[in-house]
Image: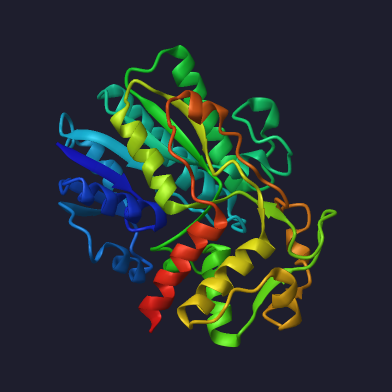
Amino acid sequence: MAMIVTGGAGFIGANLVKALNARGETDVVVVDNLERADKFANLADCEIADYIDKRDFLELVASGRYDAKVDAVLHQGACSDTMQTDGRYMMDNNYRYSRVLLDWCQAHRVPFLYASSASVYGAGSVFRESREHERPLNVYGYSKFLFDQVVRRRLGAGATSPIAGFRYFNVYGPREAHKGRMASVAFHFFNQYRANGKVRLFEGSAGYAAGEQLRDFVSVEDAVKVNLFFFDHPEVSGIFNVGTGRAESFNEVARATVNAVRATRGEKPLGIAELRSAGAIEYVPFPAQLVGKYQSYTQADLTRLRNAGYKDPFLGVEEGVGRYVKARAAAAV
């Protein structure tokens, strides 16, 4: 029986494939779009049974090719560009595609685990999986929000197979280089510091001081572990936040990044004030195009996830970003 990972050449998807391999799973079908050919590198050290272009996959599903042949669908594929303005593309790619796969999984009693997003909460201050707290700021967030509503209705009517949606907060970690400007701030801070000896953060916005905007930064290692927990526990369905439950500042991510690089050079760690004085942290004007469309604060409420039985701790920025950056620094030598 096969595991299907959509978006399997992407960031979280490729890390899922690698984790499945570590469990001895090699009958993995990857579905993706390699028009950005550099994504192939995310799978170069993975074992998969087949690769299928996302435009061909739904036709193969409809033809019956995978009937009674699938253990689970791990649906990570999506357009994650929050600045995308083509709403028709976003809704077709993120919403309609997901609905077709969900319907097929329900018809064939296949567990369906999918990527939602913390973007559904918009500029709110409460990050709990409840309708009254969901106010997306852009069409990406809306595409995720709308599909979550479909899932809620399906679960309410009595689903025929497990459905678990994961509202990822700010995920960082290996295999994200292809994402370009949509890669994590840890990725960009590392590149900036290596190239120029400094990292650039936004000046103050929405009442927050320079670099003090707060996000829930979560390691892709933890995002993968949550997916595998729900695969192992098909008795649990629902929509769940995937974050650390802690809001940490962009300044803290910058500090963790710079100090991780410094550690590889045998240099002592510095505090944020020291990094500012040394010119290692620089603040740039807040972009006009992000005004009203930017989450200055996020912090996952993990109550529902913990009640579902997931008890593992999450990596904080200092450890998680530090580990990620040290690995990147070692690979860059």
Furthest toward the top, the residue is 157
Nearest to the observer: residue 290 or residue 66: 290
Q: Measured along the vertical axis of the image, is residue 56 above or below residue 106? A: below
Farthest bottom residue in view:
196
Answer yes or no: is residue 282 visible: no
Left or right: 11, with 216 as reference point: left
Q: Residue at x 62, y 56 (%)?
A: 85
Where residue 291 sits in the image (x, y, percent)? 78, 57
- Residue 62 location (% of width, % of height): 25, 35
Residue sitting nearer the eye, 103 or 242:
242
Is 134 above or below relative to 192? above
In the image, what residue occupies the spot 50% across and 20% down?
153
Residue at the far right in the pictured view: 207
**Colouring used for the render:** rainbow
Which residue is located at x 35 percent, y 24 percent?
A: 162
Across and down, in percent, residue 221 comes to: 40, 51
Give the quadrant of the C terminus.
bottom left
Depth check: give the residue in front, 77 or 254: 254
Number of marks in the rendered image: 0
Check the image and report above or below for 151 versus 13: above
Is residue 182 visible in this depiction of the protein?
A: yes
Q: Is residue 71 left or right of residue 248?
A: left
Please provide percent x and percent y for residue 224: 38, 46
Q: Quadrant of the N terminus?
A: top left
Give the side of residue 86 with respect to residue 228, left or right.
right
